[in-house]
Image (spheres, helix red, strand yellow):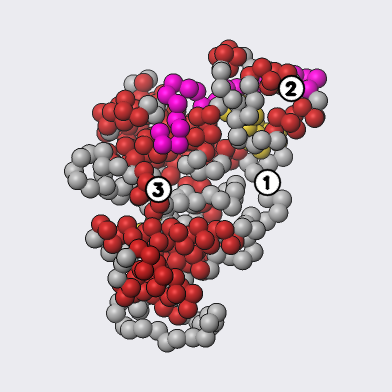
Amino acid sequence: MARKRLHPRFLTQAALLAAAAITLTFASSAWAQGSGSPAKTRPGARPTSGPFFYAQSEAAMAFATDLAQRRDLDPAWVRQQIGQAQRLPVVIRLMQPAPSGTPKNWAAYRARFIEPIRLRAGQQFWEANRETLARAEAEYGVPASLIVGVIGVETLYGRHTGTHKVIDALTTLAFDFPASHPRAAVRSEFFRSELEQYLSFTERTGTDPQSLLGSYAGAMGWPQFLPSSWVKYAIDFDADGKVDLFNSTADVIGSVANYFKAFGWQTGMPTHYPVRFDPNQSKEDLDALLAPDILPSFSAESMAGKGLILEGPALQHTGKLALVELENAGAPSSYVAGTENFYVVTRYNWSSYYALAVIELGQAVESMITSR
């Protein structure tokens, strides 16, 4: 989900792991190996050493019972799956909000993704899946370059899909989301919903909930879909009777295209335009342009009236635009005029930095393909 601390809501593998710059492995549990149930502890207690399993959490077990009743699932099975989930301290740590005043740096963030290894892997992926990418673009209207950019930023074309048990990560975030986070209650509720979706999905598909690995936010597969996104947007694009975002590149490509189409992608519309500033622009006008953040709110004409200089095709753009600022850690910020399609890309990950990295990676790979 899934997952650089650009925004506490970032859930995807790329956005979260790029910030952390770390790959961690989960510890195997005695419970999962069949050594028996851990002893009960008093409510809210945590063992001083060793792993903590959610069979020890009254809140988690109450949730399991309620979930089973609402979803018409076997209560013993649901309690067993949640009870076997292990609390992951690293997940809690990585979900802590960034320290106040942490600078953002677009140039450094971009360099993590627009680099030789990812570019070569992207070229190989495009060449190996040329027909499928063309079919997805034809059916959904989403450019092949954007699909390639997303998969490259998320998991380096399937090389880094995550090392945490999804059930462990989701249960940890559902019941131990860091209280220091300003939206802890909302995020905890969100991850309880994702845990519910995950267990319902795995039961319905006959998948072992303990078997799937993903990001520390519970995102799965090459495109790093959270369980709710898998249920809503993942498709069987290779028509083999099942959806597989771990092994079927066709399903991955079609699902990413379907996701963007579902969020309102408009075929043929650019994602952004370059901008310049009138030297006489007032601070008040700049502040007014930046106030809506990445939400398209201004016409090209109204932007010009506030001291923003647009040129060429941008002047004919009939939809709304947003002035998108990308900070450079003390150096002058970079700016683009984001269209409604740029906003759609941020629905995959709520970050303008992420969106522009995805767009530029895909465009760079496309340039390599067309220049051959």
Give residue 51's position: percent from left, percent from top.
45, 77
Q: Residue at x 42, y 87 (%)?
A: 39
Q: Earlier in the sequence, mark 1 or mark 3?
A: 1
Q: Is residue 77 left or right of residue 95?
A: left
Q: Is residue 30 above or below residue 8?
A: below
Within 10 Å of the Cα at label 2, are there few (<14), some (14-19), or many (20+) other Cα atoms?
A: some
What span is in magenta? 261-281
Give residue 240's position: percent from left, percent from top.
18, 43
Give residue 293's position: percent from left, percent from top.
65, 36
Q: Is residue 164 visible?
A: no
State the image quarter where residue 280 is shown: top right
In the rendered view of the protein, which quadrant contains the C terminus?
Answer: top left
Report how far apart the C-alphas of labels 1 and 3 lie in the structure: 31 Å
Report how far apart the C-alphas of labels 1 and 2 lie in the structure: 27 Å
Disc nearest the viewer among 1 and 3: 3
Q: Amino acid at mark 2?
A: Lys
* Residue at mark 1: 103
Within 10 Å of the Cα at label 3, are there few (<14), some (14-19), or many (20+) other Cα atoms?
A: some
